[in-house]
Image (cartoon, grey):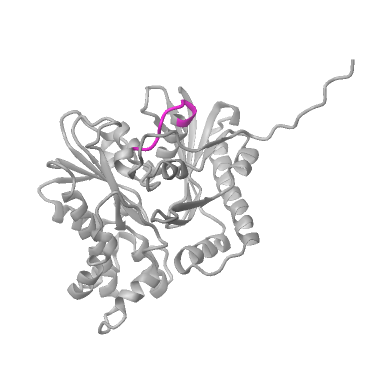
């Protein structure tokens, strides 16, 4: 459906809500018109990180309050983008909102996923129809509910004559294998969450240095890979599980890392940071090797694509396959996921499926998400 769409997502890093304005005029290939990065209030970020990392008890009242607070944070981001661009809300067909994942557990007997950020509130605050709750329709069809971005990768980045692999490195890293000429319905189109992206590195540097991230892997570069720890990390059952599979910070968090370190000789914090970077790189390398056929090109996106040390390790490990960022393919690496949710909103309004069943393990392709119209104050009929 031709028109303007907004995509908004906060990932596992919780550093900001990424907001994009996209224009769809050419089938399934929207173009980015504007972007905005909107940090959350610090108290909200800290509480959400605490919940996703340590899973403390949370009562229903607080859950409802957080649902509203996240919606307001994202609404503020959307309104800031509209203000920066001068775009009137009435020109936007829809917002595609991922929300903030609190917990993702796709395993039997009762698989579920929970994203908060009340779409009713988001629609009311912005005056724009909002599409949200994308993951649960896929889970209702037997899928993992993740990754959700593989269809967008196919629409925007597949080539007729070259096989590509797209690696999104957020808090968690995910892979899309794009065989040459693959369509959305092609069973060769595969993907899965590979394991940690930035989540463990971010959490470790936050604990030891109070910083949000290890920019360009600078701290990691001062340490050395601890081979014993790397072997322990790579032996985790999730890394060895065959796809379809998906995971999140509720699995790979500081408590998980502390458990792996228990009983090992003391390791210098910088060496642990370097080993965590290597863990991300090796798990991605092994995932790319699992793509069917020969991969001609690897495209990186997400915050981890800006980590120079991580890019260097991936380039070395995947050689001679070329490793580039999606910037080189026409989509800024920092905004791929947010753009994907603008695309998913467009698909939903058009009555088209958004999941890729060969990726998530769903029984079929399904239309994703619910549609939330902005609240309208009704007026009584005029007398007479």
Camera-side residue of 194 and 14: 194
Residue 219 vertical position relative to residue 357 in the rendered view, above or below: below
Q: Residue at x 57, y 63 (%)?
A: 43
**Quick one: 88 or 244, which is closer to the camera?**
244
**Foreground: 297 or 235?**
235
Count of numbered circles on the image: 0
Q: Quadrant of the C terminus?
A: top right
Between 103 and 87, which is closer to the camera in this rendering? 103
Q: Which residue is most to the right?
A: 384
Residue at x-position 20% and y-position 60%: 282
Horizontal relation, residue 251 to residue 237: left or right: right
Asked whether 236 falls inside the magenta stretch, the response is no
Image coordinates for residue 280, horizontal then vertical, percent: 26, 60
Would you say residue 175 is visible in this rendering?
A: no
User: Who's the residue at 25% across and 71% down the image?
Assistant: 222
Name the image quarter holding residue 324. top left
Q: Is residue 91 visible?
A: yes
Please, which residue is most extreme toward the front here? 109
Q: On the picture, is 283 further left or further right than 343?
A: left
- When the figure is inspected, residue 43 is found, relative to residue 8, above or below; the finding is below
Name the spot of residue 348 as percent of width and height, x first: 47, 31
Task: Indicate the quadrant where residue 259 lies.
Answer: bottom left
- The dominant secondary structure in magenta is loop
Left or right placement of residue 305 versus residue 125 in this view: left
Magenta part of the chain: 348-356
Q: Which quarter of the rendered picture does the N terminus lie within?
A: top left
Image coords of residue 203 (percent x, y): 39, 67
Locate residue 183 relative to residue 138 in the image: left or right.
left
Query: Residue reaching furthest left?
Result: 320
Residue 185's x, y, as percent?
Answer: 29, 31
């Amino acid at each position: 459906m031709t028109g303007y769409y907004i995509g908004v997502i906060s990932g596992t890093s919780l550093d900001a809500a990424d907001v994009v304005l996209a224009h769809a005029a050419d089938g399934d290939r929207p173009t980015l018109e504007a972007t905005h990065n909107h940090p959350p209030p610090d108290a909200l970020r800290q509480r959400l990180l605490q919940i996703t990392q340590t899973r403390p008890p949370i009562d229903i009242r607080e859950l409802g309050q957080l649902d509203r607070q996240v919606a307001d944070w994202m609404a503020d981001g959307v309104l800031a983008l509209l203000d920066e661009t001068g775009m009137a809300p009435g020109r936007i067909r829809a917002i595609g909102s991922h929300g903030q994942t609190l917990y993702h557990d796709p395993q039997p007997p009762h698989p579920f996923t929970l994203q908060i950020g009340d779409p009713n509130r988001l629609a009311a605050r912005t005056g724009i129809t909002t599409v949200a709750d994308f993951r649960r329709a896929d889970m209702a069809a037997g899928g993992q509910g993740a990754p959700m971005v593989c269809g967008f990768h196919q629409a925007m980045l597949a080539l007729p004559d070259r096989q590509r692999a797209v690696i999104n490195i957020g808090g968690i890293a995910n892979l899309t294998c794009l065989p040459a000429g693959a369509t959305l319905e092609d069973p060769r189109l595969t993907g899965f969450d590979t394991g940690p992206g930035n989540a463990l590195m971010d959490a470790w540097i936050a604990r030891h240095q109070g910083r949000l991230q290890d920019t360009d892997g600078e701290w990691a570069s001062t340490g050395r890979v601890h081979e014993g720890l790397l072997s322990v990390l790579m032996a985790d059952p999730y890394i060895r599980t065959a796809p379809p599979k998906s995971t999140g910070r509720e699995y790979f968090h500081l408590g998980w890392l502390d458990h792996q370190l228990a009983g090992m000789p003391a390791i210098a914090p910088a060496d642990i940071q370097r080993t965590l970077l290597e863990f991300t790189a090796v798990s991605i390398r092994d995932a790319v090797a699992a793509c069917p056929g020969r991969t001609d090109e690897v495209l990186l996106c997400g915050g981890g694509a800006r980590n120079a040390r991580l890019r260097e390790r991936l380039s070395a490990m995947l050689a001679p396959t070329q490793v580039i960022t999606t910037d080189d393919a026409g989509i800024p690496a920092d905004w791929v996921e947010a753009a994907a949710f603008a695309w998913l909103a467009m698909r939903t309004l058009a009555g088209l499926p958004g999941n890729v069943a060969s990726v998530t393990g769903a029984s079929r392709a399904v239309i994703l998400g619910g549609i939330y119209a902005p609240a309208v104050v009704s007026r009584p009929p005029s007398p007479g």
